[in-house]
Each structure stands twice: as C-alpha cells, then as structure tokens.
Amino acid sequence: MPSGTLWIVATPIGNLEDLPPRAVAVLRAVALVACEDTRHSAGLFARFGVGTPTLPLHEHNEREAAERVLARLLAGESVALVSDAGTPLVSDPGFRLVAAAREAGVRVSTVPGPCALVAALSISGLPTDRFCFEGFLPPKAAARRARLESLATDARTLVFYESKHRIVESLQDLVATLGPQRRATVARELTKLHETVLAGTLEQLHARVLADPEQQLGEFVVVVEGAPDGADAARLREGERVFRLLAPELPGSRAAKLAAAITGAPRNALYRLATGEDS
C-alpha cells in the first residue's frame, strides 16, 4: 500500500485572513492534523469550517506523537502538520516527524504561507540578500551575551525572535555586544491589531521600548544589520574615537563632519552618535 502524504501547512501569524484557500482545502482533506496546540488551532479551524480530527504534537511529546503520525502515514492516510502560528519547524516542533517521514520514504509536501521572520525581514529596510536566523536567544543573560558576541562580526543581517518577557533585556544586550549604532528594526505583533514596526539604531530602539510599556507587549521579531567588513569597521571605530575627542570642543554636527573627513568613517553614523538622529 502506498503511504499517504505529510503536509506541512503554514497558518496565519495573526490575521486569520492570511490562511490561503489551498491550506483550507488540505486541512479539510487529510485524515488527521497534528497541531502544536489543539486548543489554539481549534479557533482557526472553526473559522474556516475544518472538522478534521487533531492530535497534539509539541516539544514535550514529539517523539511519541511522531511515531503515531508515521504509522497513520504508512497505512496510507495523509496527515497535515501545523504550528500555533506561521510555518511549522521554524522555531516550532516538527523536525523529528519530518525526518522520520522522509527516512521511511513518505512523501512530504508543503503548503507555504506566513512566516514571521520573512515578514519582518521584508519590511525592515535592511539587506535581505544574506541573512542569519537565530530564533530565540538564550533566556539567561550570560548565555545570551555569549551567543551575541559570537555573531558580532557576522556580515549577514541577523534575525531573532523574542518574547515580551525578555525584549528589553535582549535589546540591552544587543547594544552591549553589537554596538549602539547598529541599525535595526523591531517588529511587534505582525499582522495583528496592535502591530508596530520601529526602526533606528539599537541604542534608539532600546530606549524607545524601555520607555513605553506598550512596546514591551506581544511577540517580537528583531532584525539587525550585519557587521561592516573589517576595513569599514576599523574606520568606524577610529571615527568614533576621533569624534569623542572633538565633541567636547565643537557642535555635534561639526565634530561628526571633521571626524569623518579625518578618518574616512561614514558621517551619518557619527552624526547619529552625536544626536540620535539621521543626518
């Protein structure tokens, strides 16, 4: 008997209208839907008239649940996998199931759709040709800083997920490890009613979020520009050093202009250092 198909189905990250018709059709047609949280998915399924039986598959039971799903697939039934929001396996469970299915020769197919990291990257205004997705940073401060220090010289755009419980501390650590002038975007509650997208330097964003309790609520994607190449980084460091020597004696804009002329560092970066504004 040929096996069924394991469908990896992306679901909305906020706005339920982002669920495409093909996803609805697949969810209705399969014999079973494996859900990260069946209670969470119940509301989405009710909205679109999906009455398919469900099975919980989350980080705490994935090994056992994957065995049950694989048995159904090998018996010829098709099964869909969904996470609470977005594309399954992207900082969500499902890897063991997909790996086991492929090893067993089961067809694995996708119904692509919403993904918070791609959505945030696309509106960040930062380079998208090369990026590094790091998921959630470690919850402990020491481990978090160690991870960030390992990324400090990475030239790719960096993308992180963060929760309301640690967004302020993570931004503070980003400032400390990557530098206050690194450009970044904080995307909060994407596609939801209270969506906000803040852009600026890491220093500016940390100050903005720290000062506004509302900006500390929800789910976050933080996008940070990559490190400049070695020569550019050296010029910027030297420019900042010269600027700090000139700043006590001159207006900020004049000190930035002279420091840039002396060192070859970008004047805009030095001007932001002085004023917190773009020139």
Image (cartoon, rainbow, N blue to C red):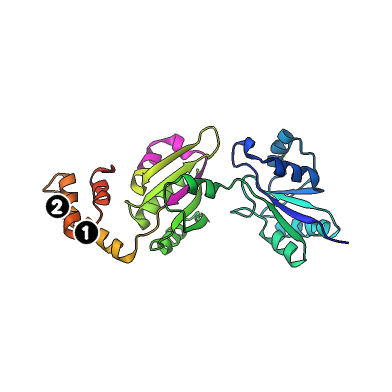
Element under disc 2? helix
- Determine whether, in the image, residue 58 is placed left or right of residue 176: right
Secondary structure under tag 1 reads loop
Q: Residue 19, how many percent across, how many down?
A: 66, 40
Front one among 175 and 117: 117
Question: How packed is label 2: few (under 14 Cα within 10 Å), some, or many (20 or more)?
Answer: some
The residue where tag 1 is placed is 264
Q: Is residue 238 above or below residue 14?
A: below
Residue 13, image x and y in percent?
59, 42
Q: CA distance from mark 2 to mark 1?
A: 15 Å
Residue 201 seen in render: yes
Instruction: Look at 75% across and 42% down and name the residue there.
Output: 25
Which residue lies at the image location 48% right of the left edge and 49% below the top edge?
121
Q: Which residues are magenta?
A: 207-224
Query: Could you tell me if the residues under marks 2 and 1 are in contact, i.e. CB atoms within 8 Å?
Result: no
Give the number of the disc on residue 246: 2
Report the amino acid beneath label 1.
Gly
Q: Position of residue 243 (x, y in %)?
A: 19, 53
Q: Position of residue 268 (x, y in %)?
A: 26, 49
Q: Which amino acid, mark 2? A: Leu
